C-alpha cells in the first residue's frame, strides 16, 4: 500500500504513517488505513448523483414501461386508430347489408333502406370522428400553451392508441422543457450573482485608487488581480461546461501510473492554494492553508486507463470542495484502489467536514448547487461557484464511469469508479 502526505496545506501535526512536505512527497510506504473490503473494493453503497433531473432517456424508458404495463398488464389490448377506422367501415357495410336483407324480406322500398343506412353510418362516423378530434383539440391547446411559455399544462393520457402515445410524448416534451427552463433561470440567476461579487470587489478597489483613498501599491493591485483572476476562472469553468455539454471534448485515453500522477495533482493543489493565499494577504479574503492532504494508493504499482487531463479535473475539483468544507486543521484523504475490471480505478476523496445530508445527495452534482451547508467551515473559506462537482460529474460521465456520495461515519466521502479498458468480445 502506498501512503503519503502532502504538507502543503500546513497547520497542525498529523499522526500519519508517512508525512512529507512540498519538496518531497513520500513514496510507497505502509500503514495507511483503508475504507475498503477484503477484495480491495470500496465498501458501502453510494448514491449516484444525477443531473438536475432524471435524464431524458430514462424518462422515455419510464414512459414506455408505463405504457406497456397499462396496455398489456391489465389484459386489455390497445386499439389503434387504423383498427377503429377499419371497424367503422365493417360496421357500415354490415348495417347496409342487414338493411338490404330486411328490405328484401319485407318488401320495403329501397329508398327508405338507403336513408336509414345513411343516417346510421353518419351517426357512427360522427361518434368516431369526435373521439379522434377531441383529443387532437386538447393537444393543440396544450401545445399552444407550451409555445407561449406555460409548461404546466398536460394532456390527459387516458387512451390506448396512437393518440395516447402522442399525449405521452407531448407531456414528456413539456417535462423536459420545464426542466430546461428552470435550469436556464437558475443559470442566469447564479451566473449573475457569481459575476457580481468579483466585479463589485474589483470596482471598489479601482474606485479607491482613482479617488485617492487607497494608494496604487502592489498590495492593492494584488487584490484587484485576485478579483480579475476569479472572474477568469469562472468564465473558463462555464466554457468548460459548455464544451462538455456539446460533446466537443475528446477523450485521450492512455495507461498511466496512479501514485505519481495523483501525488502531482495534490502538489499542484497545494501550490495553487499557497499562491492564492499570498495574493489574498491583506485583502480581507483568504484561501484555506490549514487543511492537510493525504494520499493513499494501493497497491503501489497501481495503473489506470483513462484521460489524465479529465481525471485531473475530477480530483482537483473534489479536493477543492473537500478543503472548503473541512474544519480548521482538518484532513482530506485521497484513496485509489484497483477496480473490478482491467485497468479500472476506484477513487475516494474523504474529508472531515459536516458531510452531505441524505436529502441533498441527489442534487449535489447539479450546477451551482451548494447544498444545505450555507457557509464553509474553515477560516478563510469561500463558498465557491457551485460548479466544481458538476464538472467532476461530467468528466466521469465522459469515461462512462460513476460518481456518487458514499456512506461515511464522518464527513463526506465521494466515490468515483472508472471503467478502464473496454472488455474484449469473447
Image: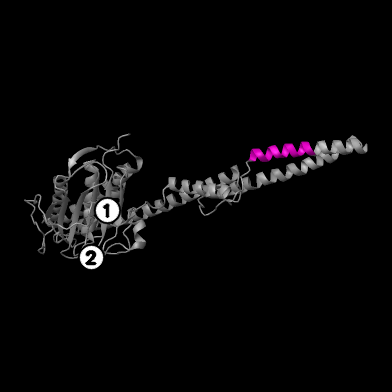
In the rendered image of this protein, does residue 389 appear above or below residue 358? above
For the stretch drawn in magenta, the main secondary structure is helix
Q: Is residue 145 magenta?
A: no
**Horizontal and vertical percent for residue 299?**
16, 48
Residue that carries the numbered disc 1 in the rendered image: 415
Q: Secondary structure at mark 2?
A: loop
Residue at x-position 36% and y-position 57% = 362
Disc 2 and disc 1: Cα gap in Å? 22 Å
Q: Quadrant of residue 117?
A: top right
Return the residue nearer the eye: 136 or 212. 136
Task: Categorize mark 1 by other alpha carbons within 10 Å: few (<14), some (14-19), many (20+).
Answer: many
Q: Nearer the viewer, residue 419 or 153?
A: 419
Residue 6 location in percent, x, y? 12, 54
Q: Position of residue 152 (x, y in %)?
A: 52, 54
Residue 287 in view, yes or no = no
Give percent across and percent down for residue 274: 13, 55
Question: From the viewer's perspective, is residue 151 above or below residue 79?
Answer: below
Which residue, as the protein is rendered here, is positioned at the far right? 107
Pick whichever of labels 2 and 1 is earlier in the sequence: 2
Measuring 68% from the left and 38% from the top, which residue is drawn there?
85
Please say whether residue 407 is visible from this viewpoint: yes
Q: Nearer the viewer, residue 66 or 267?
A: 66
Residue behind mark 2: 377
Farthest left residue in view: 23
Mark 2 vs mark 1: give the one in front.
1
**Which image quadrant for residue 261?**
top left
Range of residues picked out in magenta: 81-94
Quarter of the image containing the C terminus? top left
Residue 89 on the magenta segment: yes
Tell whether 34 sits left or right of 115. left
Amino acid at each position: 500500500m502506498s501512503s503519503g502526505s502532502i504538507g502543503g496545506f500546513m497547520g497542525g501535526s498529523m499522526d500519519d504513517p508517512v508525512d512529507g512536505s512540498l519538496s518531497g512527497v513520500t513514496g510507497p510506504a505502509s500503514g495507511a488505513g483503508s475504507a475498503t473490503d477484503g477484495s480491495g473494493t470500496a465498501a458501502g453503497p453510494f448514491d449516484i448523483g444525477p443531473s438536475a433531473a432524471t435524464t431524458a432517456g430514462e424518462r422515455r424508458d419510464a414512459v414506455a414501461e408505463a405504457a406497456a404495463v397499462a396496455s398489456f398488464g391489465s389484459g386489455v389490448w390497445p386499439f389503434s386508430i387504423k383498427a377503429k377506422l377499419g371497424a367503422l367501415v365493417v360496421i357500415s357495410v354490415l348495417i347496409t347489408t342487414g338493411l338490404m336483407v330486411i328490405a328484401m324480406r319485407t318488401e320495403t322500398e329501397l329508398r327508405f333502406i338507403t336513408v336509414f343506412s345513411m343516417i346510421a353510418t353518419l351517426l357512427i362516423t360522427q361518434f368516431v370522428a369526435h373521439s379522434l378530434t377531441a383529443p387532437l383539440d386538447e393537444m393543440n391547446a396544450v401545445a399552444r400553451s407550451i409555445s407561449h411559455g406555460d409548461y404546466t399544462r398536460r394532456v390527459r393520457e387516458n387512451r390506448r392508441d396512437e393518440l395516447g402515445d402522442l399525449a405521452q410524448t407531448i407531456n414528456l416534451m413539456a417535462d423536459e422543457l420545464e426542466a430546461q427552463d428552470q435550469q436556464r433561470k437558475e443559470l442566469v440567476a447564479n451566473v449573475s450573482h457569481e459575476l457580481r461579487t468579483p466585479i463589485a470587489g474589483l470596482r471598489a478597489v479601482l474606485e479607491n485608487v482613482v479617488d485617492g483613498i487607497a494608494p496604487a501599491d502592489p498590495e492593492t493591485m494584488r487584490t484587484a488581480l485576485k478579483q480579475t483572476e476569479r472572474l477568469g476562472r469562472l468564465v473558463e469553468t462555464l466554457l468548460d461546461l459548455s464544451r462538455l455539454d456539446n460533446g466537443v471534448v475528446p477523450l485521450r485515453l492512455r495507461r498511466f501510473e496512479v501514485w505519481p500522477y495523483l501525488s502531482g495533482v495534490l502538489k499542484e493543489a497545494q501550490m495553487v492554494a499557497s499562491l492564492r493565499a499570498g495574493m489574498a494577504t491583506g485583502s480581507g479574503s483568504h484561501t484555506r492553508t490549514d487543511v492537510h492532504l493525504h494520499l493513499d494508493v494501493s497497491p503501489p504499482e497501481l495503473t489506470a486507463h483513462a484521460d489524465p487531463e479529465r481525471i485531473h479535473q475530477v480530483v482537483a475539483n473534489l479536493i477543492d470542495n473537500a478543503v472548503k468544507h473541512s474544519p480548521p486543521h482538518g484532513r482530506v484523504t485521497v484513496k485509489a484502489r484497483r477496480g473490478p475490471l482491467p485497468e479500472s480505478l476506484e477513487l475516494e476523496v474523504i474529508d472531515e467536514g459536516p458531510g452531505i445530508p441524505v436529502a441533498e445527495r441527489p442534487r449535489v452534482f447539479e450546477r451551482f448547487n451548494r447544498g444545505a451547508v450555507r457557509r464553509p467551515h474553515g477560516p478563510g473559506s469561500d463558498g465557491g461557484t457551485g460548479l466544481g462537482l458538476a464538472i467532476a460529474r461530467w468528466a466521469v460521465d465522459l469515461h462512462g464511469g460513476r460518481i456518487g456520495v458514499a456512506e461515511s461515519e464522518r464527513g463526506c466521502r465521494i466515490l468515483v469508479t472508472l471503467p478502464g479498458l473496454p472488455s474484449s468480445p469473447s
